[in-house]
Amino acid sequence: MKKESKICIIGAGISGLIAAQTLEKEGFSPTILEATNSVGGRVKTDIVEGYQLDHGFQVLLTSYPAAKKFLDYKALELQKFLPGATIFNEGKAQTIGDPLRDFSLLFPTIFAGNIPIVDKVKILQLNLKLKSKSLDEIFAEKEISTLEYLRNFGFSQKAISQFFKPFFTGIFLENKLETSSRMFEFVYKMFGEGNAALPKAGIQAIPDHLFKNLKSTRILFNTKVSSVKDGEITLENGEILESDFTIIATDLGNLLSESNKKSTTWKSCKTLYFETEKRVIEKPLIGLLANENSPINNIFYHKSLATESHSKNELLSVTVIDSKHLNENELIKVVKLDLKKHFNIDVLRLIKMYEIPQALPDLKNLKYSLKPSETRYSSQIFLAGDTLLNGSLNAAMLSGESAANAVLEAAK
C-alpha cells in the first residue's frame, strides 16, 4: 500500500474517528479536519456549574456489535440503567421492566395495571422472536411503520399508548411511530440483549475515548471545509489542501457539487436540564409521560447513575419532541407546570436548554451495514456517517470502518 498517501477525513464525529482508527491500524496517518473545537460531532457533553449536560438525552446500547468491537467498556466506566421504565399517567406512577434481567422489577411489572396482562405476554413473545432473529434478517424485512408493526403483532391500543408510544417517541424523535419497523426490531433487540448505559463522564466520553486511542492521526480543530473535489479540499478561509483520498464523515451540506441531490432531512428535539432538591424516581429508570397534550416526553435523574462531576442537588433532564408551537419562554413555563402536574416535581431552576435541530437523520430504506465499495462517491472521495444506514451509534461506527476499508482498497 502507498502508506505515504495523503488521506483527509472531514469531521471528528464517531464515524470520522473510527475511520481514522481503521486507517492507523494499516499504517496510515490521516488528517482530520474538524469545524469545531472538540471531537464528537452530535455526541457532546458540557460541564455547567458541576453538572454533566449531554447534548440531548443519549444512551449507549451495550449490545451494539460495533460498540463492543471498538469501545473499551471498562475504560468508559459505563453506568447501566435498569431494564425498564416508570410510566406516569393521570397522577399515577407505575414501573414495568424485564424481571428476567433484574428481579427487582418482577412485582412492579406483574402488578402494573396500565399494561393488560395479555400485552405483557405478547412482550415476552416479542422478546423471544427477536432473540432468535439475526440483524441481517431484521434489515431484510419489508418496511412498515412501527405503529403498524405493533398493531399487526396484536398489541392493544392501551399498551401502545401507555408504553410503546412514549418510550419509542423518545428514541425515534417522532410521536406518530412512523419510523421503520426495521429500526424498531433492531433497537428492541439491542435493548433486550444488553443494557442502556452512560459513561461516568457523560456521553462525550465515547468520542474522547476513541480520540485518545489514536496515535498517528493529526487533527486540525476550528477548520471548516467549504467544498471538496477529487484531490482537493477548499477551506472556508480560502486555503486549498491536497488530498489523495478524502472521507466525508459529516453532513454533506454544500460540500459536493451534486450533494443537494442527497440532502438529509433531520429530526429535532429539545432537552431542558433542571436542578431539583430530590428525585421522584430513585432508581436509574427513565420516566415516561403517557399524555400527548404535554410537550414532555421523558425525564431522567442523571445522578441516579454515578457521574464524574459532583454537584449539590439533583439533575433532571426533560426531553421535548413536540414543542406544541410554543416559543422558548412559553415552553419553559409549560414544562415547569407539567412537571408539577404530572410528576409532582418542583424544580429549583432551569440550568440550560438545548435545541438540537439535527438530532437524528430521518431515513427510509434502512440498512444495517454497507460494503466498502458502497461508500465511494468518486475515485478519490468516500462517504461515512449514520445517514448512510440508520440513525445509531452502531451505524456511525460501521460506516466509518467501511469508508476506511474502501480507501485502503483504493490505496493499493
Image: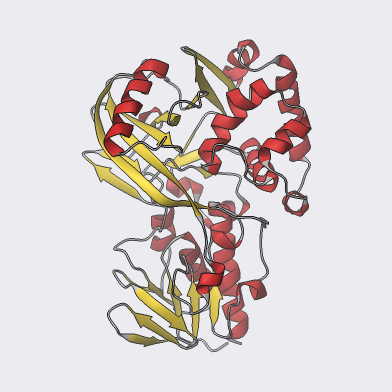
Q: Residue at x 39, y 38 (%)?
A: 325
Q: Is residue 77 left or right of residue 167?
A: left
Q: Is residue 182 left or right of residue 308?
A: right
Q: Residue 20: percent from the left, percent from the top?
A: 48, 70
Q: Residue 63: percent from the left, percent from the top?
A: 61, 45
The answer to whether 224 is drawn above or below residue 155 in the figure is: below
Q: Residue 211: percent from the left, percent from the top?
A: 40, 62
156 or 298: nearer the eye? 156
Q: Is residue 355 left or right of residue 361?
A: left
Residue 25 seen in the figure: no
222 or 52: nearer the eye? 222
Q: Residue at x 35, y 46 (%)?
A: 355
From the image, which quarter does the N terminus lie in? Answer: bottom right
The answer to whether 129 is drawn above or below residue 379 in the figure is: above
Q: Is residue 343 left or right of residue 130?
A: left
From the image, which quarter does the C terminus lie in? Answer: bottom right
Q: Residue at x 54, y 84 (%)?
A: 380
Which colour scheme appears in the figure?
secondary structure
